[in-house]
Image (cartoon, helix red, strand yellow):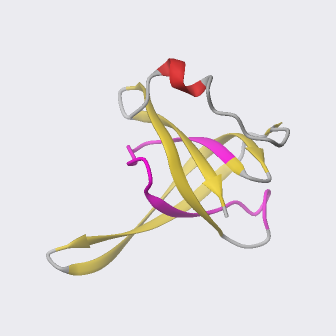
Amino acid sequence: MHKREDIAQDKRAERRSVVSTTVHYSYSFLKDQELRCAVGQGISVNVSPSGLCFYAPQMFQEGQDLKVYSPRLWEAPRAAVVRYCLRVNGELYRVGLSLS
């Protein structure tokens, strides 16, 4: 996880739009040598053509692949990679993604 100071170093080239909407996410993982899928949802903070920041109730690992979708933002799910994950408090995390 990154520290608060690291967030200031996040430099997307495109302008960010502040948008608060539900973001659905999914990811795959191995458990007992079986490929599994997990899903969840969070709330967006801001979005640009190349990135998304959102709050989620779980921690993610830097470099982790996700699929994200919000009907308010995109017509179809987007592939994403976790760039940072910062615990805000308790079970709430601020997650920065780069979008494909």
- Residue 59 magenta: yes
Decide which of 18, 4 is in the foreground and name it. 4
Quarter of the image for the N terminus: give it.
Answer: top left
Decide which of 84, 89 is in the foreground and name it. 84
Q: Is residue 79 above or below residue 13?
A: below
**Residue 29, picture quadrant:** bottom left
Most extreme residue toward the left is 32
- Residue 75 magenta: no
Quarter of the image for the C terminus: give it.
Answer: bottom right
Most extreme residue toward the top is 5
Q: Residue at x 14, y 75 (%)?
A: 32
Give how far across and how far down residue 25 sits, in percent. 54, 61
Q: Residue at x 79, y 71 (%)?
A: 75
Q: Is residue 65 left or right of residue 20?
A: left
Give how far across and how far down residue 37 sits, in percent. 38, 73
Q: Residue at x 43, y 57 (%)?
A: 64
**Residue 10, picture quadrant:** top right
Q: Residue at x 29, y 79 (%)?
A: 35
Q: Which residues are magenta?
A: 52-74
Decide which of 30, 63 is in the foreground and name it. 63
Q: How many marks?
A: 0
Q: Is residue 3 left or right of residue 94?
A: left
Give how far across and how far down residue 99 sits, in percent. 66, 58
Q: Is residue 35 above or below residue 57?
A: below
